[in-house]
Amino acid sequence: MTLAKAAQRVAEEFEFTPDQVRNGVKEFLAEMDDGLQKDGTFMNQIPTYVTAVPNGTEKGLYMAVDLGGTNFRVCSILLHGDTTFTLNSSKIKIPQTLMKAQTAKELFAFLAKQIEAFLKEHHGEHYECHIEKKQKGEQASEEEIFNMGFTFSFPVRQVGINKGYLIRWTKGFDIADAIGKDVCGLLQAEIDALHLPVRVAALVNDTVGTLMARSYTSPGKTGTLLGAIFGTGTNGAYVEKLSKVTKLTNAEEKGLYDESTGEMIINTEWGSFDNGLKTLPNTKYDAALDKDTPNTGIQMFEKRISGMYLGEILRLAIVSLLDDPAVPLFSDENSGSNDFRTTTLVNKDSALLKPWGIDTSFLSHTGGDSTPGLQITRQVLQRDLGVHGPSIEDAQAVHVIAAAVGKRAARLSAIAVGAIVLQSKRLDVPASDPPIDDDMVDIGVDGSLVEFYPGFEEYMREALGEIPGVGEKGEKRIRIGIAKDGSGVGAALIALVAGRALDAVAR
Ligand code: ADP
Ligand code: MG
């Protein structure tokens, strides 16, 4: 068989038809509803207790901190009230010893110290003034306290806008003492010990931050519907009618949010959409990848879409061709032998031969390669993947398969985006022709995949147009924008609405 034919055959395994998109949307809508009604579903539909999105007129000075896997980021954000903002920030690497501290207090005291240092550097006057008052025994007034959003990227059971219990650590952290404790409370206690003028007003998920940041900066009067991440993982948070969140019923929960908007932002955790594989594709490469992960059978949607996995899917597909003696991929034509396996151009220690050896950025490089003779693909194959002097045919084969993997990811993403647009019923409202700003359904996105994979949005849009109830007309009313600095600005905006809600509840 020719190489081109073999590659084409593998690429076809990644085709995801319009019918499959439509079936996926149906299943997604069903799983969304299920998750709104009860706990314990795979697509968790976590209520965030955030009950409004910003419209760009918000004003004021807020703080945001972000504890990710590696760094602790502290920012202050001045919202100008005209969809623009200015941002100060600092970033500190978390010391290894604190990631495995004996007590939670050690870590959170360190975090509070960083907030103190940031305040002294960027808001010195405010800080001094507050400390002076404290020393005189005067009470600080509400306006003098910074409301702060706390982005905490570990699994928590959130029970209020600024309350969430740590379920488990991930990403190398291990402090047993913190498990089951309210992480906002832990941070607030250490902030108070330093007498800082800061209130931990909100616990923030990065998807919600993206939604808020986009809603603040987006054009037009209509708030953003969805914030979606396509980075290492994939997830989304959207605006839902409060009346649909029927699992939020008990009195303790009800006291913790403002019901007046009639809406609540829901963190879908859509990475675990259709773990049962009722509608998702499952090639032999998908199945092999899943087996090789610590969470087999879970996050099945994410495993077909996001940056952590696409490189490995591509690698497995390429290896399947390499293993086929009838397919001349990366074969050394000058060797004089006809056995492709012994005459390969592939280095013995090539990343191609190592599980998880290909980074998803490779898909972007070859996917977007429009040079004559696929120069870029051949260069990257040589430089990053240890293939010596690949031919144009080799590069063509890799390009075709990589493009198919990327396109499938984008078309799968349309299931989530399309289902949430349908759920919102925003397209049912008649629009002008052509649609004006206020007719648009706005979506904020973040993550390297959507930002850098060439054509990701176009492929997603093509699939959106195939969904009944969206169609080509509806697709044109969907506006997708990157949410820059989403984690800082979004957390600040959540701190703003949370601060209001907390004040309202306190009154
Ligand atoms: P995070 O998810 O940690 O916030 P990113 O949004 O930057 O970070 O996503 C990182 C993921 O994106 C990694 O899995 C990486 O392989 C992938 N990635 C990085 N650069 C690119 C690129 N140019 N094209 C496609 N994927 C990329
Ligand atoms: Mg991110």
Image (spheres, rainbow, N blue to C red):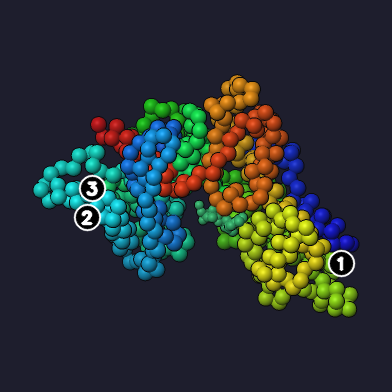
Q: Quadrant of residue 59?
A: top left
In the rendered view of the protein, which quadrant contains the C terminus? Answer: top left
Task: Identify which amino acid the numbered label 3 is placed on.
Answer: His
Give the crowd class for mark 1: few <14, some 14-19, many >=20 residues within 10 Å. Answer: some
Q: Give residue 286's position: percent from left, percent from top.
A: 69, 56
Q: Is residue 55 visible?
A: yes
Q: Earlier in the sequence, mark 3 or mark 2?
A: 3
Task: Identify which amino acid the numbered label 2 is placed on.
Answer: Ala
Q: Is residue 33 visible?
A: no
In the rendered view of the protein, which quadrant contains the N terminus? Answer: bottom right
Q: Earlier in the sequence, mark 1 or mark 3?
A: 3
For the residues carrying marks 3 and 2, which lies nearer the camera in this image? 3
Q: Residue at x 80, y 63 (%)?
A: 392
- Residue under label 3: 126
Left or right of 378, for residue 254: left
Q: Residue at x 14, y 50 (%)?
A: 132
- Residue under label 1: 326
Q: Give residue 35's position: percent from left, percent from top.
A: 53, 39
Q: Earlier in the sequence, mark 2 or mark 1?
A: 2
Q: Give residue 280's position: percent from left, percent from top.
A: 68, 46
Q: Quadrant of residue 425?
A: top right
Give the crowd class for mark 3: few <14, some 14-19, many >=20 residues within 10 Å. Answer: some
